[in-house]
């Protein structure tokens, strides 16, 4: 009877161990995940709003430039994409007549500089940053403009 009772206890113990979900059968492990930062340098410039200018009031506008970089620092530069004789000047979209005054730009909306074909620094930053570039266009008395005339210029931004 003692043997039968021991067999019943052993069978009950084994059944309980098998019924417990994974208690004695659990296994663990690890998997290391690593990463290396790659080189990234990109630039996105918002299209400035349309300027409205008169002989009495300069046209003004601004553009936000976003730089994304994995470098510790970067420098943003600006130039006129036109490197010809009318560099820096907005051209009439029909006929290509240039305005007398150069388009002016400013990194802080206080001190304005004439835009030229030579790249000049707008500012610098680190990693991801934005710069707002302000524009101003004055009409000269000699500019023979008419209502609804359109002028344009393509600004070139570079980041290094």
Image: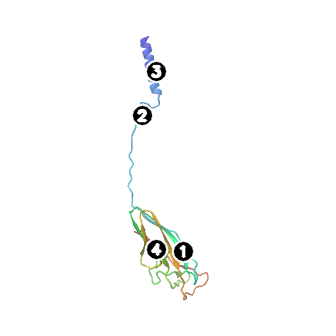
Residue 98 on image: x %, y %: 51, 84
**Callout 1: 10 Å neighbours few (<14), some, many (20+)?**
some
Q: Which of the marked residues, 4 or 1, is nearer the chain's N terminus?
A: 1
| SS assignment at label 1 | strand
Residue 133 on image: x %, y %: 49, 72
Give the distance between the C-alpha atoms of the residues marked 2 and 3, in whole angstroms: 22 Å
Q: Residue furthest top?
A: 1
Residue 107 on image: x %, y %: 47, 73
Which residue was labeled with disc 2?
Answer: 26
Check if mark 2's residue and mark 4's residue have beta carbons within 8 Å: no
Check if mark 4's residue and mark 3's residue have beta carbons within 8 Å: no
Which residue was labeled with disc 1?
Answer: 61
Give the distance between the C-alpha atoms of the residues marked 1 and 3, in whole angstroms: 85 Å
Give the distance between the C-alpha atoms of the residues marked 4 and 3, in whole angstroms: 83 Å
Q: In the rendered view, tell whether residue 61 sits above or below residue 8.
A: below
Mark 1 or 2: the one toward you: 1
Which residue was labeled with disc 4?
Answer: 156
Q: Residue furthest bottom?
A: 142
Q: Which of the marked residues, 4 or 3, is nearer the chain's N terminus?
A: 3
């Amino acid at each position: 009877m003692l043997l039968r009772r021991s067999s019943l206890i052993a069978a009950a113990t084994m059944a309980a161990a098998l019924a417990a979900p994974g208690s004695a059968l659990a296994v663990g492990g690890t998997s290391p995940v690593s990463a290396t930062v790659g080189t990234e340098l990109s630039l996105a410039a918002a299209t400035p709003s349309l300027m409205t200018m008169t002989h009495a009031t300069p046209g003004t506008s601004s553009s936000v430039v976003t730089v994304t970089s994995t470098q510790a620092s970067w420098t943003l530069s600006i130039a006129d994409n036109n490197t010809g004789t009318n560099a820096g000047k907005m051209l009439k979209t029909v006929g290509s007549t240039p305005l007398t005054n150069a388009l002016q730009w400013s990194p802080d909306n206080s001190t304005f500089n004439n835009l030229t074909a030579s790249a000049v620094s707008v500012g610098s930053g680190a990693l991801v940053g934005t710069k707002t570039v302000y524009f101003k266009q004055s009409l000269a008395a000699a500019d023979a403009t008419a209502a609804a005339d359109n002028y344009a210029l393509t600004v070139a931004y570079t980041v290094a």
